[in-house]
Image: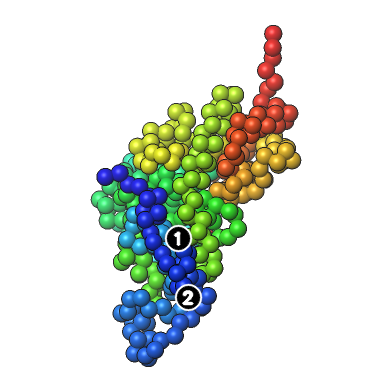
């Protein structure tokens, strides 16, 4: 049966404490117990439906977690204060001293820095590989390997991981496949394709209003509960918890996620086709020229398209900067990192979000100086946007003026 993530979100029904149509916000960090024995049992993990302390769980966080688990089709989920606050405890819950993991080399800069510079201090080694080459991934697995880590659609080069292929490798070697799905919510559902754990930075498309940070780990009840254990759970003990006011606002924004993703995708597809036709080097998974186009198609939930992210190559960093400044002047978007906002956001990854990656490694993976990453907004008139962007490109010289004979 076809997986319908937006239906799963729609089908949740909540009543607030006073019959409100939104669930009540739990404005408390700590919770009372009528009996001392119940408090003891809760610490032992033996009571369901009892709240203890909001770093562990709050009602508002459970509501949001439930919606995200419904979206990914996992048993449960645990929200965190940021995307990194979801990623780091997941890695540390699975890997410890002496363990090894295989990671895509094109991942979010913060995750890359964590695996490259931080976890080696704890005796965790990472092999960074081209995740699109399953034979290379398999050859990197050794007897200490515990996990394969990747992004469904990678940042910033928009490489697409073959989740089914990676899941079968994970199964063969008894590893956990952990997938960061931040770039492709609704479009791709990694847990349905065999991923064990699915992570999102809620800061991006899922919240969509660039007003808060958030993260989530979606997985089996066994895994999520282990992360939340008061004895040795990495989420509980590292303490990146979300505040209830924020989780309630993110839950409200999730109700429009399906509409937003369709619009982001339609707009990005329109621009990508135009830019490519104009002769710009354009990377968008929806383009036939994209090396992972077919893989994306084979995994996608059709109605949501290929997502809102695309890149172009402006030729040089100077040209990229000039173009971005001009586009911001013309109010076509903001020169800002992050993604999923109603306005287009653009940045040059080499000097911003991926600057943690050394220059020679950037070159090797095809991350050029002139690369501009776009998170395409919800513009109602994308044709007008395109015309205005094209004018900017002509003015800056990223596009040549057409010579009429
Ligand atoms: C932004 C981002 C993160 C980190 O999330 P924060 O909410 O900024 O901590 C992780 N992965 C990807 C793909 C991202 O885009």
Image quadrant where residue 222 sits: bottom left
Left or right: 118, with 401 as reference point: left
User: Which image quarter is the N terminus in?
Assistant: top left
Viewer-proximal residue, 66 or 363? 66
Q: Where residue 19 appears, x then y in whole percent?
A: 45, 69
Q: Residue furthest front?
A: 19
- Secondary structure beneath dot 1 equals strand
Residue for badge 2? 54
Q: Does the rendering let one see residue 19?
A: yes
Viewer-proximal residue, 67 or 150? 67
Q: Crowding at label 2, few (<14), some or many (≥20) Cα neighbours within 10 Å?
A: many
Q: Where residue 240 appears, x then y in whole percent?
A: 50, 68
Q: What residue lies at 45% left-to-right and 82% top-to-bottom?
A: 31
Tell me: is circle 2 under 8 Å from ligand 1. no
| Snapshot colouring | rainbow
Q: Which of marks 2 and 1 precedes in the sequence? A: 2
Q: Crowding at label 1, few (<14), some or many (≥20) Cα neighbours within 10 Å?
A: many
Viewer-proximal residue, 304 or 129? 304
Q: Which mark is residue 256?
A: none
- How far apart marks 1 and 2 lie (CA) works out to 16 Å
- Secondary structure beneath dot 2 equals loop
* Residue 214 in the image: above or below residue 364: below
Q: Does the rendering let one see residue 178?
A: no
Q: What residue lies at 51% left-to-right and 56% top-to-bottom?
A: 253
Q: What residue lies at 46% left-to-right and 79% top-to-bottom?
A: 53
Q: What residue lies at 47% left-to-right and 75% top-to-bottom?
A: 54
Left or right: 295, with 330 as reference point: left
Q: Where residue 247 appears, x then y in whole percent?
A: 50, 64
Q: Residue furthest bottom?
A: 36
Residue for badge 1? 216
């Amino acid at each position: 049966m076809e997986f319908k993530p937006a239906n799963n979100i729609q089908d949740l029904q909540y009543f607030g404490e006073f019959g409100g149509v939104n669930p009540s916000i739990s404005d408390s960090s700590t919770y009372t117990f009528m009996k001392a024995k119940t408090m003891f049992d809760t610490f032992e993990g033996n009571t369901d439906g009892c709240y203890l302390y909001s770093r562990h769980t709050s009602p508002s966080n459970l509501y949001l977690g439930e919606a995200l688990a419904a979206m990914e089709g996992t048993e449960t989920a645990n929200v965190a204060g940021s995307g990194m606050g979801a990623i780091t405890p997941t890695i540390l819950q699975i890997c410890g001293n002496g363990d090894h993991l295989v990671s895509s080399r094109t991942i979010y800069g913060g995750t890359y820095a964590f695996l490259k510079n931080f976890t080696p201090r704890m005796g965790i080694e990472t092999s960074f590989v081209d995740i699109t080459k399953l034979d290379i991934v398999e050859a990197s697995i050794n007897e200490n390997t515990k996990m394969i880590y990747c992004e469904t659609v990678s940042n910033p080069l928009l490489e697409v991981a073959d989740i089914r292929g990676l899941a079968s490798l994970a199964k063969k070697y008894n590893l956990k496949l952990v997938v960061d799905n931040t770039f492709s919510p609704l479009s791709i559902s990694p847990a349905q394709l065999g991923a064990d754990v699915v992570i999102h930075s809620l800061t991006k498309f899922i919240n969509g209003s660039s007003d808060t940070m958030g993260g989530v780990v979606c997985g089996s009840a066994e895994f999520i509960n282990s992360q939340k254990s008061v004895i040795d759970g990495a989420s509980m003990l590292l303490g990146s918890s979300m505040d209830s006011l924020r989780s309630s606002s993110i839950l409200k924004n999730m109700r429009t996620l399906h509409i937003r993703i369709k619009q982001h995708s339609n707009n990005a597809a329109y621009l990508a086709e135009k830019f490519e036709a104009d002769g710009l080097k354009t990377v968008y998974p929806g383009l036939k020229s994209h090396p992972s186009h077919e893989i994306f198609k084979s995994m996608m939930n059709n109605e949501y398209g290929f997502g809102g992210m695309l890149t172009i190559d402006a030729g040089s960093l100077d040209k990229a900067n000039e173009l971005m400044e001009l586009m911001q002047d013309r109010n076509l978007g903001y020169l800002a990192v992050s993604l999923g906002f109603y306005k287009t956001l653009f940045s040059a990854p080499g000097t911003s979000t991926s600057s943690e990656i050394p220059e020679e490694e950037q070159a090797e993976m095809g991350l050029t100086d002139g690369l501009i990453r776009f998170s395409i907004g919800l513009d109602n008139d994308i044709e007008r946007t395109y015309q205005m962007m094209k004018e900017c490109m002509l003015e800056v010289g990223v596009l040549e003026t057409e010579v009429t004979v």
